[in-house]
Amino acid sequence: MKTFTLYIGIFILGSTALAQAQSKILLVNGYLHVGDGDVMETAAIGIINGEISFVKNSNAYTITPLEWDTVIQLKGRHVYPGFIAPNSTLGLTEIDAVRATRDFDEVGTYNPHIRSQIAFNVESKVISTVRTNGVLISQATPRGGSISGSSSIMKLNGWNWEDATILKDDGIHMNWPPSISGGGWWAEPKPKSANKDYVTQKSKLYDFFEVAKAYSKTEKNNKFDIRLEAMRNCFKGEKRVYIHADELQQLVDIIDFAKHFELDHPVIVGGYDAHNITRLLSDAKIPVMVIRPHSLPENEDDDIDIGYKLPFLLQQGGVQFCIQNEGDMEAMNARNLPFLAGTAMAYGLTEEQAVQSISLSAAKILGINKEYGSIEKGKSATLFVSDGNALDMRSNQIFIGLVDGQFIPISNMQYELFKKYTEKYN
Amino acid sequence: MAVCLQFLILHLQQTNIRMKFSLLFTFLCVSLSIFGQLKPQNGVIDSEAAFYALNNATIYVSPTKKLSNATILVKENKIIKVGVLLKIPKDAVIIDCKNKTILPSFIELYSSIGLSEVKPEAWKSRPKYETNKQGAFYWNQAIHPEINAAELYVKDEKANKSLIKKGFGFALTHQSDGIMRGQGALVSLGSNQLILSTVSPASYFSFEKGVSRQSYPSSLMGSIALIRQTLYDANWYASNNSERNLSLEALNTQLSGNIYLKTRDKLDIPRAQKIADEFNLTFNYIGSGNEYEIVKELKEIKSTIVIPIDFPEAYDVKNPYVSRQIPLSDLKHWEMAPQNPSILLRNGIRIAISSENTKDQKVFWDNLRKAIAHGLTIEQALNALTMIPAVSVGVDKQIGSLESGKSASFMIYDEDPFEKNGNLIESWSMGKRTVFERPNDTEIRGEYAITIADHQFQIEITGMPKELKGTVEYKTSVEGKLKDTTAKAFVELSDNDITIQFNVSQKEIKGSVNLRGKVNTKFGVFEGDGFLPNGDWAKWTAVKSGEKTDSEKKRGPDLIIDTSNYAWLPNMSYGFESLPKTETIVIKNATIWTNEDEGIIQNGIIVITNGKISFVGDKNARINPPIIARVIDAEGKHVTSGIIDEHSHIAISKGVNEGGQAISAEVSIEDVVNPDDINIYRQLSGGVTAAQLLHGSANPIGGQSALIKLKWGHSAEDMLIDNAPKFIKFALGENVKQSNWGVNSGRFPQTRMGVEQIYYDGFIRAMDYANEWKSFKTGETTSAPRKDLELEVLNEVMNSDRFISCHSYVQSEINMLIHVADSMGFRINTFTHILEGYKVADKMKGHGAGGSTFSDWWAYKYEVNDAIPYNASIMHEQGIVVAINSDDAEMGRRLNQEAAKSVKYGGMSEEDAWKLVTLNPAKLLHLDQRMGSIKVGKDADIVIWSHNPLSVMAKVNYTIIDGIVLFDNEKDRELRTRNLAERGRIISKMLANNNIGAPKRNFFKKKKGHYHCNTIGEELSTEENHH
């Protein structure tokens, strides 16, 4: 059984990963997917105090075992940078249908001051099943309202939200008004139509931003405004503006909006229609965190594989993009992120482009690429090793995983139940 | 006014004598010339002419007979004679109908005229199980055949006039609410008579619950089941009526008469016809306007279809960002709808035309002419508006055409309305004349010289007869020179009087000239008195000096008519232009995953003939491949049997749950399969060839399944698998106890404890029921028990004639149901979802149940807290037949990926993992004799993959069902291009119509939702739900 690898991992490393003795770790003979599009077939990766100290060719490197706390022979196994799940409620919800476990949607229309960081549950059982598929970083993202709140970039390992934080309040998330509106709710749906109030709603967003921008011009405001304070960094290029939108009309308007407010880091989240305006988007240098590829087409006429091939269309059109997973059961589904990239690979991306779309590209768009997103000297040792191709369901078998040089448990409550009941029948 | 033989005039208050008299008059043929005088006369009787002679008219005597220069002779309320050169009696009043067209009055078969709308009670969130209607009526408030339109009819002059203006003289009206709506009444719209008797009653059914707030039925399949149960009850009641039920009594009188079933979609017609066939009834259908899409099925049905002509208006398509959202199916329907009447007729389908939903006479006639421009002949149109409805109601001897002896019911138009914009000027309703307009035929257009006092003016009169315009010309002297000046003039002709007004500015006369006078057309002269600006009255004359110039208002460009288009199958994106056929196919050089002892064959060959697999072998196999065959070189490709989805909710119309009752075994998804769901095509592209369409999980005992093959382009009936084993959905846990509703709805059960009792109670009742029938059949009891559809189905389960697929999550409830089944003597065939199956695999094995599960779903509700992705592997290891299913339209497209996850979680072998979505679901569905593997003699349901099907790289090249290539990756690219071209073509046509000012509407985008297990109600979910 292939799952023996799991036992091996646990045997070698113990399962209390957080209290870890090893600070000098050498990985040898790994098939390295750097994350930037490159591969190295026989890589040796040195890790000291959580940082990658070198990446070399194993064949040209002589190991001196005494220099290392542990040396792990990978025997050709695949090494990947920890995958990144942007725009996710992972850690903010546990059981979708149980309201008490849902902590991602606050009351209010303009909520930039609402911060996901402090609601992030490091001990989420769901998280434990996500990182064992290679997803090691997420962007904990609030939902709802016109401006949902501020997200934070989190490691999927840690004692508490403080030490799990990679970048706090990395950006605000706003829902662009729909150009097509209506719809009712599911039991009493109403027809949708072109949103008559679109221009008005858009203007309101402009108005709010004008106020916030004016406020940001001075450090000493007459009156402290908690909302506007949360917006301040958006105009200084220190906080990203994530704009959730899918429809063509919205997307072209967002390009104008970003120009108007001279936003340094606007990001489109969703971008179902983005493939129609790749030129505009690449000229405007606006990246897209593209819809979950495993999404049904919006319209019955659309290409039946539009979700699958959207990443490729953006790649071809020169748009900077990464894959995200917002949608039905998104927290638990975060563990399928590698297979979303895998599907995008089947529909046009090269293998390394697919890897990049959930690692370095995501890190760049989120602004954490100096430390995360690829396996390069000087970066954080946030990576994992899989027995085979991690983008394929059959061969995504985690061997070891590291977050900032800390070994993560490669077991989870589901695996424990598997063991328990396998034993029951034996 | 007198009454002709079969007609009975009744005033509202006298309905109680209706039955008696109608029998008397219909069958005894007693002449009753003065019976109409039921009501005492105030004063002496109204004066009437002995005869009316309407002459010089163009007369549509009947659909097939049109006369010019003809005369109708009317005496009292009847037509005495129609013809050319008739001898007109001396005492006749002559009405000159020169240039006029006379049509028989139309008959509307779908109307609720004169009946007030039924108001719904306020909506309440709690379910409601009791009817509001106390009394000896049927238990369900949507079933009220006892409603009699004749008793409720109140003449509504305004509504009548609006229908008369469209050309209708009669309407079959009914209370348009509910499922069994009651009896209709044939009303005369324009005469003093209110309701006409018909030989047999006409009544109305529909699938819509209407204003009833009773929870049941909440779905289309529930409506269908309710109609069936009620019909069985009516049959039973006929011989077991110890307790009176007025609803069933009324229904029993209606069943031999005319039943009109109102549909909302073309697919409702075959659905209803199944009921008609089961009970040996004849239904006529009130159509919805898209019947042209299923002509093939309608041809088999010998019914009259009453079709609307409320053709969709063009969308406003000027903004391409908006118009790109309009589904091609809507665009195509816009283009095709006006052809609905002609296509149906061309295929020998009998249609009547209804004016339902046409706003006014203009829209009605514009649309009728549009239908004529799209291939309907005038003869057919008239037939569909007169004789077909008359025959349908059984009054064709009295009305519907203008032959002698028939009722004097006709309409007079100033021009032939079939050809031009004819206006209704008179209606004759059973002899009663109503004049709407007396058109002035006096032609005064032309040039005239006006003389008044000493002044001379020239005037040119132009314009339409009703909107005349004048231009006055006179000389003014400017700086000593005479100059021509013109001025606009007001001109109005009323009867024989003319009014002219204009302003002049001359030295001699300055101000308004107002003229009034008589017209003498014979000499082209007007004369009368005029009032001049200086206050003088003066005589004036005008003498014609020139004929009218042709000033007919130039009409705008015509709508573009193109009848070369046709409906695709289905009529939407990715629809076929013609249905692909079963082919002889040779697949060679393939890597074949047989799912049989042969395992995976390299370099293999498969031959498909007559829809079956006729040969499988490797490269060394000796075979003479068929000479004429499509040869597919599958070099480097993998070939498998098709994916079978054990748990799917795609392709279902109007409701996946009948949530109105905790046990709804009587409803069946088979009744509501929707072949137009794009998800069929999408899943074909993912290699799915067959699926079990399951009832949802709202009830402990849900409804019956439909087992289908995903035969895109085929009818719902053709998709159903022939002789498929019968299945029913059971469900446990949070959905049936409505845990996630937020409030306690009050429906039993609300706990797992209650769920158990529902089963015991249901099955004990089912056993009692079976015993009652047994006693009856052995002669122990004499009266037949009432047939109960719900309990019949439970007995099928008890007798192993129907298999159970049970939605289940946690081990306690799984264990419970196994105990219930074991103790009551039935078996659970499949536990579906079964996320804690790994905990009770031994018990499942002992009971003989299979499991159909998700690969890795969890965390969406409390009861899946212990769900693990290793579930399939553990159950498989314990020897249970395990399948991976979708329960989700999106995931259904890539079940191959989901199967592959069992390699990851639990280390299943690839061949076993592949069986999770092919052979194993075939076994669970008892279809493995025909499907699930590649074996000679099995159905040719084959998928050709680009890679190992479990690989994330795998894409489908071909999906073949019964030897028919239904998905072809190359062809799919062509279809996309074709879809866009079709969109472009129709959008241009629509734009052209936008630009000539044809009526248009804004685009409304209907959110396409998807059913999940716990979607309640008819409408699709627009949010994702729990499973």
Image (spheres, coloured by chain):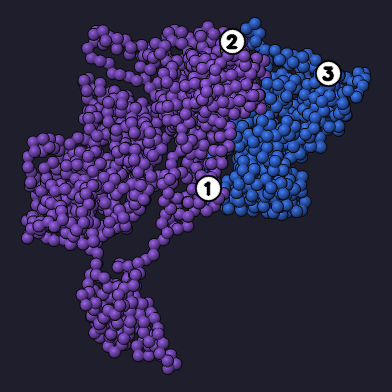
Chain colours: A blue, B purple
Q: Which residue is mark 1?
A: B984
Q: Is residue A45 visible?
A: yes
Q: Check disc 2 and give the amino acid type.
A: Asp
Q: Which residue is mark 2?
A: B597
Q: Which residue is mark 3?
A: A73
Establish if A196 lies above or below A319.
below
Query: The numbered mark 3 sits on a residue in which chain?
Result: A
Same chain for the residues under marks 1 and 3 in the image: no
Label 2: state its secondary structure: loop
Query: The numbered mark 1 sits on a residue in which chain?
Result: B
For the N terminus of chain A, give its image quadrant. top right
Earlier-in-chain disc, 2 versus 1: 2
Give the distance between the C-alpha atoms of the residues marked 1 and 3, in whole angstroms. Answer: 60 Å
Say which residue appears at 70% left-offset and 41% top-offset: A316
Establish if A108 lies above or below B659.
below
Label 3: state its secondary structure: strand
Give the distance between the C-alpha atoms of the residues marked 2 and 3, in whole angstroms. Answer: 40 Å
Point out residue B541 in the picture as x, y percentages from the top left corner.
25, 82
Is B503 in front, or is B563?
B563
